[in-house]
Amino acid sequence: MKSVFLATAFCLATTGMASALTPTPDMGRTVACFDKVWIAPTYTVTKELVQPKKRVYVKRRGLIELVEYAAIYREIKTLKEDGHWVLRQIACKKK
């Protein structure tokens, strides 16, 4: 039985019919289509107080005004997850 199979494979290979038996993209059916999408890296951000808010009396145009300045913060970013590629399923286009 093994020798018959080998002889058949040899005949197909020498006659060029082996290429007809190899799978090609045209022989199968499309099950699903996917698109490659880049997912950006994610960060955790914390705030660090640099200068608290303050109120200052300022003399302007002959008047004394109370001026309030907002607090100043510094953002500290820490990488949570690296960016990566994801395959997302999309609707297949008809040919």
Image (tube, rainbow, N blue to C red):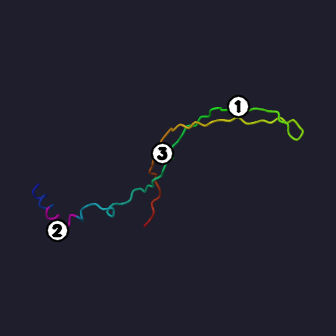
Residue type, numbered disc 2: Thr
Could you tell which of marks 3 and 2 lies nearer the N-terminus?
2
Per the image, label 2 sits on a secondary structure element best described as helix
Q: Quick one: quadrant of the N terminus?
A: bottom left
Front residue of 20/57: it is 57
Q: Quick one: quadrant of the C terminus?
A: bottom left
The image position of residue 36, as x and y in percent, is 45, 53
Q: Which residues are magenta?
A: 10-18
| Mark 3–mark 2 CB contact (< 8 Å) | no
Label 3: few (<14), some (14–19) or many (≥20) C-alpha neighbours in 10 Å: few
Would you place residue 92 above or below residue 39 in this image?
below
Per the image, label 3 sits on a secondary structure element best described as loop
Front residue of 58/84: it is 58
Front residue of 62/20: it is 62
Q: Is residue 15 magenta?
A: yes
Q: Residue 15: which disc?
A: 2
Q: CA distance from mark 3 to mark 2?
A: 51 Å
Residue 13 appears anywhere in the view: yes
Residue placed at 51% from the left, 47% from the top?
40
Q: CA distance from mark 3 to mark 1?
A: 35 Å
In this picture, residue 95 sits left or right of residue 78: left
Residue type, numbered disc 1: Pro
Q: Residue 74 falls in which quadrant of the image?
A: top right
In this picture, residue 76 sits left or right of residue 2: right
The residue to which callout 3 is attached is 83
The image position of residue 93, as x and y in percent, is 45, 63
Residue type, numbered disc 3: Gly
Q: Residue 52: which disc?
A: 1
Helix, strand or loop: magenta stretch: helix
In this picture, residue 2 sits left or right of residue 27: left
Residue 1 appears anywhere in the view: no
Could you tell which of marks 2 and 1 lies nearer the N-terminus?
2
